[in-house]
Amino acid sequence: MEAFRIDVPQSRLDDLHERLRRTRWPAELESVGWSYGVPVSAVRELASYWLDGYSWREHEERLNRLPQFVTEIDGQRVHFAHVRSARSDALPLLLTHGWPSSFADFSRIAADLSRDFHLVIPSIPGFGFSGPTRVAGWSVARVAAAWVSLMASLGYSRYGVQGGDFGSLISPAVARLDPAHVVGVHVNALTTFATDDMAGLTPEEVERARGVERWQQISGYAAIQSTRPQTLAYGLADSPVGQLAWNLDCFESWGRDVGGVARDDVLTNVAIYWFTDTAGSSGRLYRESAAAWERPSAPGTTPTGIAVFPGDSTVRRYAETAHNVVHWSEYATGGHYAALQAPAELAEDLRKFFGGLA
């Protein structure tokens, strides 16, 4: 295990800026909005800001305020931030990001959460500063096993787990692998699938359940990353604007939550993917993890808390078929990227849930 500090060479920044200046922009249809994908105007505006307004060095310095390390687990480099609380009795909390996010999402709430928790914030293998994966097989289950090893290596015998998006799959998988040490699971942005005709659901729950159908209509990105991630990688590895557009589509919820994530947070995530050349390897998680979307044969036994934010397709009745739900919260503000869009609400929900398990 070695200390790590983010330090992107200036030559990489110069190359990025040159590529942004030389972007070849595609043609597009008029008056179709987001219905065919990200509008050129949206990408042009953000790319212009990336070139002339956004400061990577400022955010690099901000991220480096988090103590960071790299280690090797199961033959793979693993990067993580480790923020110890001043409280000697603080509960260790393992935070897992999703796609197209990174460990940087949690940098916005780390100082707040560290008042009550020791924080371990890893980069999923294949993402960001963990670098590209080199062998096949890095699925949700394998990532979860790596997280169990990571927490053991840090000397934590009792800890909680939290995650959104892919983190909402990885975190419960950690608990299933390590039930003797995981005291609780907290998730947001959890997708649940209807198992019946939805009779008895409230109108709000029906609307959430139908969110899965709406997602399937625009989920081409997931289909590609689940089947041909290497083919996609060539364009994303060669064009920063290609990487920006691909990730922005999800950050803006395919046109339904434009501006919901601050543009500096979007660009910090996109820049991490670009500088670490992890566009292709992060996409492979979709191909490796097809089985992770299947409902387990029996609910998990670890106490589970679920926070639901606007846009989430999460229905309690269906969540309870896979999880031991003991805590449920619904919020009127925020969104899929809760650590960025509703940091105070997420932090408070974590305190309420894990405080009740003490």
Image: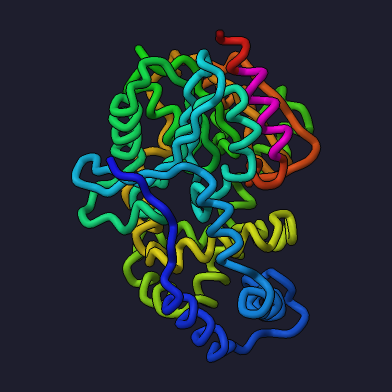
Quick one: quadrant of the N terminus?
Answer: top left
State left or right for residue 144 relative to residue 244. left
Q: Is 140 placed above or below 113 here?
A: below
Res 289 seen here:
no
Residue 349 % position (x, y): 67, 25
Displayed quadrant of residue 339: top right
Q: Was residue 196 drawn as part of the magenta stretch in this picture? A: no
Residue range (magenta) = 343-353
Residue 262 % position (x, y): 71, 57
* Rendered residue at 57%/42% (across/down): 106
* Rendered residue at 42%/53% (across/down): 5
Res 341 seen here:
yes
Q: Is 235 placed above or below 79 here?
A: below
Q: Is 153 placed above or below 267 here?
A: above
Residue 291 % position (x, y): 35, 40
Residue 296 % position (x, y): 40, 26
Quick one: quadrant of the C terminus?
Answer: top right
Task: Report the predominant secondary structure element of the magenta stretch.
Answer: helix
* Rendered residue at 56%/18% (across/down): 87
* Colour scheme in use: rainbow
| Total count of labels | 0
* Front one among 263 and 233: 263
Q: Is 170 placed above or below 36 here?
A: above
State left or right for residue 161 relative to residue 177. right
Displayed quadrant of residue 260: bottom right
* Rendered residue at 72%/40% (across/down): 342
* Front one among 61 and 235: 61
* Front one among 90 and 190: 90
